Each structure stands twice: as structure tokens, then as C-alpha cells.
Amino acid sequence: MKKLSNSNILVTGGNGAVGANLVNKLLTFGSKVTVLDDFSQSTSSNLKPTKNLIIINGDINDAKLIKKIFTKKFDYV
């Protein structure tokens, strides 16, 4: 999908089974993906590190963390 190429995308819960599949698909489109996950449903990462992937271990309820994450502009959340 050309539209997603080079897009900055934030995926919450991106380490879970569904989220990891979504993230991997977005990466194949050339997207730059940031994942926010607290790893509460898994003990290890379901994602392989790449130059277009940033993984943040944290809770979506942490307002301070969310504010810090959103200093970056995302095309899609």
C-alpha cells in the first residue's frame, strides 16, 4: 500500500498476537512503526527489531509517557 509507505504509525498492544501481525504487515509496506505495549500478555517480544520499529514498554494509562510519545507526529494511531 503506497499510502502507508514512510507513514509514522503508533500501534498500542502491538506485541500481542493480533498486534504483532498488524505491525509486521505495516513494516512490509515500509511504514515506520512505534509499538506501545506493557507486555502483560507475554513475556517476550513477538516482534523482530528493525530500523523502522520502535518498541516502548509501557502502559497506555501512564499520562506522562503518552505525552512524551506524542511529541512525535503520527500519521495513524
Image: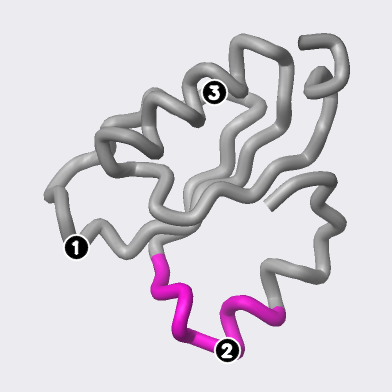
SS assignment at label 2: helix
Query: x%, y% of residue 16?
Result: 28, 42
The crowding category of the residue bearing disc 1, from other C-alpha atoms within 10 Å (few below 14, some 14 to 19, many at least 20), is few
Instruction: Give the residues drawn in magenta, as a range.
Output: 58-67
Using the image, determine if residue 9 lies above or below residue 63. above
First along the sequence among labels 3 and 2: 3
23 or 69: nearer the viewer: 23
Residue 33 among those drawn in magenta: no
Q: Residue at x 61, y 23 (%)?
A: 26
User: In screen coordinates, is 37 left or right of 50?
Assistant: left
| Residue with the mark numbered 1 | 40
Using the image, determine if residue 43 lies above or below residue 40. above
| Residue with the mark numbered 2 | 63
Q: Check disc 1 and give the amino acid type.
A: Ser
Query: x%, y% of residue 14?
Result: 42, 44
| Residue with the mark numbered 3 | 50
Q: Check disc 2 and give the amino acid type.
A: Ala
Q: Marks 1 and 3, Cα distance to the nearest angstrom?
A: 22 Å
Q: Check disc 3 and give the amino acid type.
A: Thr
Q: Residue at x 68, y 68 (%)?
A: 69
Query: x%, y% of residue 65?
Result: 57, 79
Using the image, determine if residue 47 lies above or below residue 28. below
SS assignment at label 3: loop
Whether tag 1 and tag 2 are in contact, CB under 8 A, the answer is: no
Q: Marks 1 and 2, Cα distance to the nearest angstrom?
A: 18 Å
The crowding category of the residue bearing disc 2, from other C-alpha atoms within 10 Å (few below 14, some 14 to 19, many at least 20), is few
- Asked which quadrant contains residue 28, the reply is top right
Query: x%, y% of residue 64?
Result: 60, 89
First along the sequence among labels 1 and 2: 1
SS assignment at label 1: loop
Q: Nearer the viewer, mark 3 or mark 2?
A: 2
Q: Nearer the viewer, mark 1 or mark 3?
A: 1
